[in-house]
Image (spheres, rainbow, N blue to C red):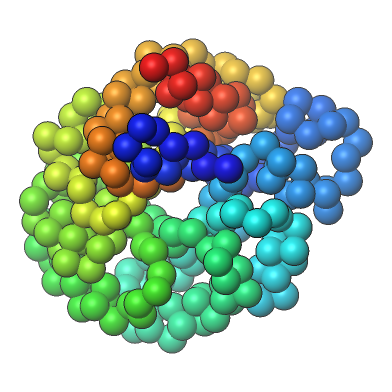
Amino acid sequence: MAAKNKDSAQLRLGTSAFTAAGWDGSFYPAGLAAKDYLSFYAQHFDTVEVDSTYYRLPTPRMTRAWYDKTPKGFLFSLKVTQTITHERVLVDADDEMKKFLAGVEPLAEKLGPLLFQFPYFNRKAFPGIEGFLERLRPFLKKLPAGFQFALEVRNKNWLGQQLSDVLRERGVALTLIDHPWMPPPAEWLRRAHPFTAGFTYLRWLGDRKGIEAETTTWDKVIVNRRRELSEWVTLCREFARRRINIFAFANNHYAGHAPATVRLFRELWEKD
């Protein structure tokens, strides 16, 4: 079950994907069949961020199988396909978006937020955020009701009132990420005006290049993130105080072993 704080905001914690090199024997029981991974995962976490849908459109057959392998109350967050966010960058993307939503339909009440993860846009792509917002605003207005959406940008100079106002108009959550290009936790409130929806979306991504110089097998913690996660706890308490639900996902690149990152955050969260 999702954890609740005294103000009844829900906290859901999971990992970015439910498979990784090194998880067999460190998170999953050694020798567990891959077809049983998701069912085992759902015994320990109440949500997962699905990364595979970024690379290819989900199919009803695929998402129906996910639904059948997870218990009541489990939620899937899916990354929207890169065709929409990286290749077309929202231009002529309506049909692709309809196909994406049709593919996730079998998840029904187990469908959580859908994440638009955009790359870092330099000045060649967009001279400033105004050009991106001119493209974003009409796209968001066409999105159907009944879904939760989150949006991630990786240019810290784009954070601010303009972006937040556009997201708030449509009730889209601004995604907060722990990433070398982006502000530390304490600065998100000041820079980003992140209260844009009834939920917030956090991603602990880390320094991919840096950690891959040390390991590419994600079976143990490589980087001590206790200090940073303590700062995220403080920030999350501000969302909880406002009764804004929290989805938070850990990537292996953050500390070396995503399940351990989630366990540490939960430990810090439950201290008070």
Residue 203 screen position, x and y as percent: 42, 40
Residue 20 screen position, x and y as percent: 69, 39
Residue 244 screen position, x and y as percent: 30, 46
The residue nearer to you, when weighing 192 against 170, is 170
Instruction: Tell me the residue at 60%/53% (across/down).
Output: 74
The residue nearer to you, when weighing 81 against 30, is 30
**Is the residue 96 above or below the residue 83 in the image?**
below
| Image label count | 0
Instruction: Tell me the residue at 44%/78% (across/down).
Output: 97
- Which corner quadrant holds the N terminus? top right
**Is the residue 266 above or below the residue 89 in the image?**
above
Please give left or right for residue 2 compared with residue 219 in the image.
left
**Is the residue 80 above or below the residue 28 in the image?**
below
The residue nearer to you, when weighing 7 against 214, is 7
Residue 88, quarter of the rendered image:
bottom left
Observer able to see residue 197? yes
In the image, farthest residue toward the right: 31
Observer able to see residue 178? no
Residue 182 screen position, x and y as percent: 27, 35
